[in-house]
């Protein structure tokens, strides 16, 4: 049996490096004395800027913050965070009349009536003009009313309604850095100029430009798209997903809120001519950008299209161009090097998975942490899990393109007809022509359940626009009275929750430690006017008194971050 590993060296900062350090420090320093003898060192270059990732997150993020021992109030205040109830997809599909379809992927899943999925009842009987997600969760109604997921005065991390966060990626990384250093993580700001390997090919030391030789045991590569150690030194092959996903570049910029007292509680994804634009509403500003295919737009063409899309909301700041390496390493763990974050892989940020991928990779590392023998079964199993995670996210992202039906640009035609569909997804798409996604369909579902697939398929209305096989639903006998009873109960519960939950802006001010007074309830929450389009409606172009739009902070000026 090998000796315990006492030294962990992380190369690279940013969200990936500092979240990795924060989580490992939390996992390994839980003893009564607070010290397990493991030293964590993070080395980052003072000369290489980071690519901010993770401005929007998934529902595991509250657990991540609790695991790391972070105060939710401090997190909201420091990172200008807001709540996220799901993702609004606009203009991705059209209905039978050629009209734009908008739909929501909420942080909730559908249920059953007498063992039969809600989706079947919805397809047969509809829901009195409601969208599919409204029959099983309140997230869409809360977002339309500019509500958050909890009432004022609730305890930290209260989870009455499924939610995640929007956050400033740069500020979050800096917050994690400060906490790590205060807890004993060693921080070295130097360039790595050479990597030494022993006779087995393991990394034995890093040569730093100022302090010289730094011996290592376990190395975690968080060096971004370059993969300085995992790819350039260890020569691990990179598996490109370009045959499945066309988008390989992004533009990013920050803009002010049109009305800073009305902060949407959903991320928005709006389909454009050669990709899609994200919109992430933080407390103090909006992060937005355009993910596109360089085969269909030059950077200049994409910039012009994106600025035209922003319209009057554009503040004149030129978007930053970010090339994206889309795919994953064949193995995340090679010898004594483990790649986390962009160095391990990246998939376009349509479902805001970047921080989740970091978080999950570090949790699995802590679970299968090696000794100095680096047992092959641990390494093999870890690599299998990480590969399955990337492929899971790849399949779900590919779904959005494979089931698109727009014909107004070559990009959307190519996305549907020229891109390959992964075998695992193609097999399920054949099944789902005959039956809704079910509990036994997915090979790996650590994040996207079959209920999430249902929300997308029914949101896109594919069963109304030619996707279903001729025999779809022919053998089902559904009682309309049971469905109507469910709709009445669901509507009453949603109305109650919308009435109970706080105005989003007011809730955020409370979480930031500001004095607030409850905003009087509107006479009819359904009349609230959104600043982003919601399904079924057009896209729109308390300190108690409305405050002026906050300016973008000075330390945000390089914060053009990927979603």
Image (cartoon, rainbow, N blue to C red):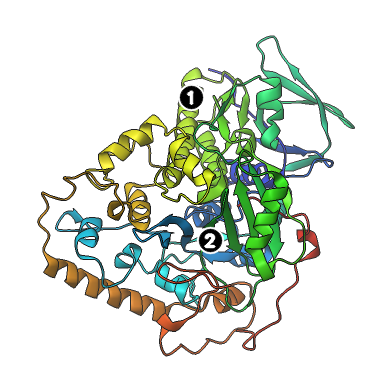
Dot 1 corresponds to which residue?
A: 378
Q: Residue at x 46, y 88 (%)?
A: 521
Q: Badge 2: how crowded within 10 Å, few (<14), some, or many (20+)? A: many
Question: Which marked residue is nearer to the observer: mark 1 or mark 2?
Answer: 2
Q: Are marks 1 and 2 in contact (CB under 8 Å)?
A: no
Q: Earlier in the sequence, mark 1 or mark 2?
A: 2
Tell me if residue 280 can be seen: yes
Q: Is residue 138 above or below residue 274?
A: below
Q: Position of residue 70 (x, y in %)?
A: 60, 58
Q: Secondary structure at mark 1?
A: helix
Say the numbered circle drawn on residue 2. none
Q: Secondary structure at mark 2?
A: strand
Q: Quadrant of residue 5?
A: top right
Q: Residue at x 83, y 34 (%)?
A: 191
Q: Position of residue 525 (x, y in %)?
A: 42, 82
Q: Residue furthest right?
A: 210
Tell me if residue 150 can be seen: no
Dot 2 corresponds to which residue?
A: 267
Q: Quadrant of residue 114?
A: bottom left
Q: Residue at x 60, y 33 (%)?
A: 344
Horizontal relation, residue 227 to residue 61: left or right: right
Q: CA distance from mark 1 to mark 2?
A: 37 Å
């Amino acid at each position: 049996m090998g000796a315990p590993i006492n030294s962990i060296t992380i190369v690279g900062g940013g969200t990936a490096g500092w979240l990795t350090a924060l989580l490992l420090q939390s996992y390994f320093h839980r003893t009564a004395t607070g010290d397990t003898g493991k030293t964590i060192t993070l080395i980052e270059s003072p000369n290489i800027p980071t690519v901010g990732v993770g401005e929007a997150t998934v529902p595991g993020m509250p657990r991540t913050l609790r695991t790391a021992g972070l105060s939710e109030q401090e997190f909201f205040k420091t990172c200008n965070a807001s709540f996220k109830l799901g993702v609004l997809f606009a203009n991705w599909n059209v209905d039978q009349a050629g009209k734009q379809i908008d739909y929501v992927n909420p942080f909730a899943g559908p249920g059953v009536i007498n063992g039969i999925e809600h989706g079947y009842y919805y397809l047969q009987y509809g829901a009195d003009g409601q969208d599919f997600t409204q029959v099983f969760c309140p997230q869409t109604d809360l977002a339309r009313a500019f509500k958050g997921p909890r009432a004022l005065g609730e305890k930290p991390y209260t989870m009455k309604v499924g939610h995640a966060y929007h956050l400033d990626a740069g500020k979050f990384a800096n917050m994690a850095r400060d906490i790590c250093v205060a807890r004993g993580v060693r921080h070295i700001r130097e360039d790595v100029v050479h990597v030494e390997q022993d006779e087995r090919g393991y990394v034995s030391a890093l040569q730093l430009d100022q302090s010289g030789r730094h011996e290592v045991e376990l190395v975690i590569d968080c060096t971004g798209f370059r993969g300085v150690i995992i790819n350039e030194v260890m020569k691990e092959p990179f598996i490109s997903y370009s045959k499945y996903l066309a988008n390989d570049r992004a533009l990013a910029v920050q803009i002010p809120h049109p009305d800073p007292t009305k902060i949407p509680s959903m991320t928005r994804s709006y389909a454009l001519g050669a990709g899609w634009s994200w919109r992430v509403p933080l407390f103090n500003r909006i992060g937005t950008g355009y993910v596109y295919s360089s085969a269909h737009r030059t950077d200049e063409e994409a910039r012009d299209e994106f600025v035209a899309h922003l319209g009057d909301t554009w503040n004149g700041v030129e978007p930053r161009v970010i090339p994206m390496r889309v795919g994953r390493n064949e193995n995340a763990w090679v010898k004594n090097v483990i790649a986390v974050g962009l160095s391990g892989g990246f998939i376009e940020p349509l479902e805001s998975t970047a921080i989740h991928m970091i978080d999950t990779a570090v949790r699995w590392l802590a679970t299968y942490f090696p000794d100095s023998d680096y047992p092959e079964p641990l390494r093999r199993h870890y690599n299998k899990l990480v590969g399955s995670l990337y492929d899971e996210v790849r399949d779900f992202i590919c779904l959005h393109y494979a089931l698109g039906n727009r014909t107004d640009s070559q990009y959307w035609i190519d996305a549907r007809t020229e891109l390959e569909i992964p075998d695992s997804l193609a097999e399920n798409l054949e099944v789902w022509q005959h039956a809704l996604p079910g509990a036994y369909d997915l090979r790996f579902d650590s994040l996207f359940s079959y209920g999430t697939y249902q929300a997308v398929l029914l949101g896109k209305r594919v069963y109304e626009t030619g996707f279903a096989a001729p025999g779809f639903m022919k053998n089902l006998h559904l009682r309309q009275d049971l469905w109507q009873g469910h709709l009445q109960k669901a509507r009453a519960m949603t109305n109650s929750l919308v009435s109970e939950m706080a105005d989003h802006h007011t809730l955020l001010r409370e979480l930031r430690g500001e004095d607030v007074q409850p905003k009087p309830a509107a006479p009819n929450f359904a009349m609230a006017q959104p600043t982003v389009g919601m399904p079924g409606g057009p896209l729109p172009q308390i300190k108690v008194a409305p405050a002026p739009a906050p300016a973008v902070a000075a330390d945000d000026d390089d914060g053009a971050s990927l979603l």
